[in-house]
Image (cartoon, rainbow, N blue to C red):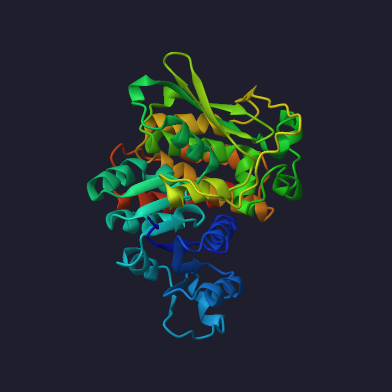
Amino acid sequence: MGQATKNIAILGSTGSIGTNTIEVIRSCLSRFRIVGLSAHTSLDELYSQVQEFEPEWVVGTCRTAWDEFQHPVLKDTANLGGTEHLDSLVRADNVDIVVAAMVGSAGLASTYAAIESGKRIALANKETLVMAGRQVMAAARLNQAEILPVDSEHSAVFQALGETPLEQVSRVVLTASGGPFRDFSSADLKNVTIQQALAHPTWRMGKKISIDSATMMNKALEIIEARWLFDLPPEKLGVVVHPQSIVHSLVEFIDGSVVTQMSPPDMKLPIQYALTYPERCTSPAQKTDWTQAVCHELIPADFERFPALELGFEVARQGGTTGAVLNAANEAAVEAFLNGQIGFTDIVASCRTILDHHEFDPNPDLNELIKIDAWARQEIAKWILA
């Protein structure tokens, strides 16, 4: 029997995840139809996508950029400016799957609205679970929403776990490329430039995620995400450095068996799996060349040179407001580094300070998390001036 066409809304359609999602959809147009697109400031690229796919909704989330942009008026397309319109888009009856690909805490509200509407969420916005993992997963259970991971590491865990009961899982190990500085000494890290930090050896990503990979804060956030997404205690989570980025995660079971998912570093594969699950179909993603000799390294992570990792495990253990504080402090600190206001090693050091001095609440609601997000950003600004 033929597959029913699924209607897709892509939030953050001009970013790395968004454009890869569009490549996946181009390769299997009989399965998917794009009904909604959003972007922040890359509005020329957004409207190239709009002209190709003719969605019913298009949202420019930066109101200033939207008001200045001379956007064409397309028949049967709602042209909307402002983040408030994302709520209506993700709740629309004809949206089946929401690809949550917005960067940072800005993606929380729209992802939560999609969850409340019982949609399938292809989740690339890890900050949603870092900030509000307990609340988000509870809302997903209540509304029977599906949250399927798009991060390559979490997609690998999802595939390796299958239907295995969690009590049979001994350990989940996320792999990390190690970023551009995996062989740098602590002294070398103090002199890292912006250009060096943006030069990731494996993945092509936006500036913020590239810096997170360089500090290994990206892996810290993924540890927190995995804790909530798979309902795993932090003591069952680990990290190893894998420079080749072929082994995306490992799941060790209580009998000692280790199951992994391997593939070339191409985000189109985990994106497509989140869209087609539980089925698989031919993918435009890069395939493994089995005629070539390869060597896959798995190296213990160095927590001393990359202290962001310990912050990740600490937040995964404590929960409460810590995730929102760490995420906001990191976003603000990365922006300050990219603006030349602080050094590379100051990014994690400032996050450590803000996390240590915040007023911890073990059971915050979403409004409290939004408030403490703003507080942490203000504290980073004070830290820079101190």
Residue at the far left in the pictured view = 142
Name the one closer to the observer, 286 or 224. 286
Which quadrant is the N terminus positioned in? bottom left
x then y, percent, for residue 223: 48, 34
Left of 260 or right of it: where is 324? left
Q: Residue at x 57, y 39 (%)?
A: 217
x then y, percent, for residue 185: 74, 28
x then y, percent, for residue 4: 37, 60
Q: Can residue 375 be seen in this view?
A: no
- Determine the image quadrant of residue 99: bottom left
x then y, percent, for residue 242: 65, 30
Q: Residue at x 64, y 35 (%)?
A: 246
Left of 205 or right of it: where is 329? left
Q: Residue at x 70, y 32 (%)?
A: 182
Residue at the far front in the pictured view = 1
Q: Which residue is drawn at 37% across and 58% down?
A: 109
